[in-house]
Image (cartoon, rainbow, N blue to C red):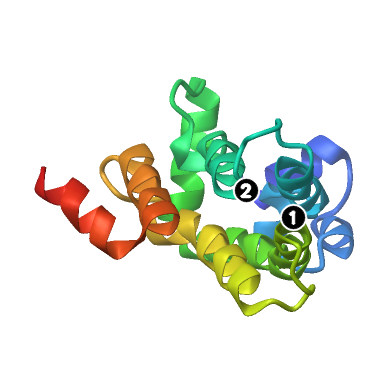
Amino acid sequence: MSVKDIADEADVSVPTLFKHFPDGKPAVMFDDGVERRESLLAAVSDRPPHTSVLTALREFMAGRGPFVESPSRAFVRRTELIMATPALRDYSRKLWIRCEKPLAEAIAAELGQPADDVTARAVARYVLEIPQFVGDEPEPRKALDAIFNLLEHGLATADQAAIS
């Protein structure tokens, strides 16, 4: 569907459509990122008892984009379009990275650390880069799990798992 088709569906002109989406064409494909941010924060703060922050974030990410195990055909087409279109993929990354500060603060709070804790900031950045980093892997879900295994257990353990 072209931008003109979208404008026609909305019964507005293309310039009017872009007044509502100042970030351009990529913004037409995505929401404003508020749902993404709120869902991420809820994954951390509302996780079940005895569930680690990383486990909660792994489960959250497993339900997004290329990591969904049984997606609908429309979902697959949309995800493939985003992953194959540099402007859309970059815009998606931009939406993820906008979540870095609030996610880092939520992680720090859960760990009993100051809001600017470097460890919490690093975990937030690593987690938010995962879709961009491994989204086009042949087996994205397997790659997602490998990254979280690394974050949860460290490099030595990840190396051992790769060997066996």
Asked which secondary structure carries label 1, the reply is helix
Residue 74 sits above or below residue 143 on the image: above
The residue positioned 68% from the left and 61% from the top of the image is 95
Q: Are marks 2 and 1 in contact (CB under 8 Å)?
A: yes
Q: Amino acid at mark 2?
A: Val
Screen quadrant of the C terminus: top left
The residue positioned 69% from the left and 76% from the top of the image is 117
The residue positioned 70% from the left and 59% from the top of the image is 111
Residue 53, disc? 2
> Could you tell me how far apart the alpha carbons at marks 2 and 1 are, in whole angstroms?
8 Å
The foreground one among 78 and 109 is: 109
Q: Name the residue carrying label 1.
A: 110
Left or right for 140, reference 119: left
The picture places residue 127, in percent across and down from the top left corner, at 54, 58
Asked which secondary structure carries label 2, the reply is helix
Farthest residue, direction left = 163
